[in-house]
Image (tube, rainbow, N blue to C red):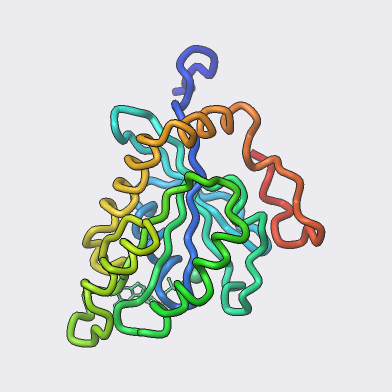
Amino acid sequence: MEASSTSQPEFDYLFKLLLIGDSGVGKSTLLLSFTSDTFEELNPTIGVDFKVKHVNIGGKKLKLAIWDTAGQERFRTLTSSYYRGAQGIIMVYDVTRRDTFTDLSDVWAKEIDLYSTNQDCIKMLVGNKVDKESERVVSKKEGIDFAREYGCLFIECSAKTRVNVEQCFEELVLKILETPSLVAEGSSGVKKNIFKQNPPQSGAATSGCCSW
Ligand SMILES: Nc1nc2c(ncn2[C@@H]2O[C@H](COP(=O)(O)OP(=O)(O)O)[C@@H](O)[C@H]2O)c(=O)[nH]1
Ligand SMILES: [Mg+2]
């Protein structure tokens, strides 16, 4: 059955969310865990990859474009285009690897400051792999303290068992919906299509992702 494309808009807002953090913390697994029930598979791109999920949150129909790295975080070479226009940033660490936690302040928070184009952009700190409780080295309290210091939301989850995965995205989006400037961008982004931005100088990292 073909739905009419003229009457009801497909969604109220389009938000760009992105995942950052060290290699191996579970970013891709988290994304799959959240989107694998009902997701639209898009062509993988060179450099970055994103998945789209339609959700109803806070009484709104939302189209979430969630960007994941294709492993280039290993070389610390995410470009500004990855961050551009994001309303939400998910900062992931592995509760069983302290280096992934300290890198959030040493590396990733600095990148956000440098590249994020939205002053009001909502950040969510995520301690992943809580299913490996016996191997935990970063306490929940440390996560809470970091989040307080950096003004982030905070949640611990397991992309493997799916504990708190939905909540992670939901809380982030609810907070975005409470932020007027981000909501405004979410609706203007729908019109001007936030994916049709000029690629950065090199172009290689993001070309090919803009055809929808
Ligand atoms: N036990 C456990 N393993 C996980 C979890 N999330 C991811 N992993 C594993 O951690 C490894 C790295 O995950 P991946 O999603 O590729 O990390 P990325 O490099 O941040 O994208 C993979 O072997 C995953 O199966 C989790 O919540 N619990
Ligand atoms: Mg990955």
Q: Is residue 60 left or right of residue 107?
A: left
Which residue: 35% across, 54% down? 34
Q: Is residue 84 above or below residue 49?
A: above
User: Looking at the picture, how far across and down is residue 135, in whole percent?
Assistant: 23, 87
**Residue sitting farthest toward the front:** 149
Quarter holding residue 173: top left
Which part of the image, by quadrant, shows the N terminus? Answer: top left
Q: Is residue 97 left or right of residue 42?
A: left
Quarter holding residue 141: bottom left
Quarter holding residue 178: top left
User: Looking at the picture, how far across and down is residue 86, in whole percent?
Assistant: 54, 47
Q: Is residue 106 above or below residue 199?
A: below
Which residue: 64% across, 42% down? 195
Q: In front here: 181 or 161?
A: 181
**Residue sitting farthest toward the right:** 201
What is the count of numbered marks?
Answer: 0
User: Looking at the picture, how far across and down is residue 85, in whole percent?
Assistant: 59, 45
